[in-house]
Image (cartoon, rainbow, N blue to C red):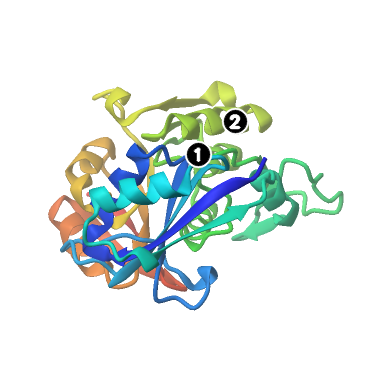
Amino acid sequence: MPWLELQLTIDTGLQPRAEAALEAMGALSVTLMDADADTPDEAAIFEPGLGETPLWRSLTLLALFDADADRRVLLQRLQGALPELVPDRADFRVVADRDWERAWMDRYQPMRFGRRLWIYPWNIEPKSDLDPEAVVVRLDPGLAFGTGTHPTTALCLEWLDGLDLRGKAVIDYGCGSGVLAIAALKIGAAQAIGVDNDPQALTATTDNAERNQVAGRLRTCLPEQLADTARADIFVANILAGPLYDLAPRFAVLCRSGAPFALSGILAGQEADLLARYRDCGFTDLHAIRREDWIRIDGVRE
């Protein structure tokens, strides 16, 4: 079945109202891109910095509706919610239906991280000539983030591969597909907790844990369900800079003394405030490692 796509270009300050209006109009999804990028591939993720200064001056919002939605009515409702909107900054097009997840999987190939860790799509059999010490994670991301293809995930996977995880308890905060928690368990961790505010991510994590025969050692929960007594020997959080800043005191409680930790999802330029914040919250031996436009911060809980 085809879909109707509404493309809307607005000033960044209008984003909360525009996104709320589109959702109220019945949008099935809303995607945000940099309106100044030449192609979608050049558009960076939309996230304000810690000082709440947007990265983009203008945004392009792509909202998906049922194909039979009335364009005239949609535009009228949008202009009613956003009187500032210039009509020619909104455009419609019909997009063909396809299995987006499976189309992506067709292009997803095995990847190596660090010395021994491999991430394989669930539908590709590992090579028979892999190193005997290779650790293979079979992954289907489902509707959740985290495959290893993004620099934030790759930075965390490489960090995990360099640790001695034998017998350790791991907390993966913002688990997405579960790739980090599952990799830690397959490398040698005794148990792991995957935490995410998206129930679909928890479902994907559980499914992937079963696929990798580690479900018995992995628990999942929403943030508010995480027990106050939960403690990590190894802690990793791949989310975004704003939540990482806000959650620093909480993370300090979750980490046992001496626990290695890693934070990712940080855009270059955001690390200085986070380094200071985590230093103040009792973390030490801090390092900022960059890949492309993304930063991993790692260190140790005092």
> Dot 1 surroundings within 10 Å: few (below 14), some, or many (20 or more)?
many
Residue at (22% x, 69% y) in the render: 272
Q: Is residue 270 left or right of residue 158?
A: left
Residue at (45% x, 36% y) in the render: 168
What residue did someone put label 2 on? 209
Report which quarter residue 25 is drawn in.
Answer: top left
Point out the tag, 1 or 2, that comes first from the N-terminus.
1
Q: Is residue 271 left or right of residue 168?
A: left
Q: Amino acid at mark 1?
A: Ala
Return the x and y of residue 82 as percentages of the image width and height. Answer: 24, 54
What residue did someone put label 1 on? 181
Q: Amino acid at mark 2?
A: Ala
Mark 1 secondary-structure assignment: helix
Mark 2 secondary-structure assignment: helix
Return the x and y of residue 115 as percentages of the image width and height. Answer: 63, 60
Can residue 301 be seen in the rendering of this structure? no
Q: Is residue 211 above or below residue 284?
A: above
Return the x and y of residue 182 as percentages of the image width and height. Answer: 56, 38
Report which quarter residue 22 is drawn in.
Answer: top left
Q: Disc 1, disc 2: CB below 8 Å?
A: yes
Residue at (59% x, 42% y) in the render: 141
Return the x and y of residue 140 as percentages of the image width and height. Answer: 65, 40
Residue at (19% x, 66% y) in the render: 53
> Dot 2 surroundings within 10 Å: few (below 14), some, or many (20 or more)?
many
* Viewer-side residue, 180 vs 147: 147
The span from disc 1 to disc 2 (Cα, nearest Å) is 9 Å
Q: Is residue 250 left or right of residue 263?
A: left
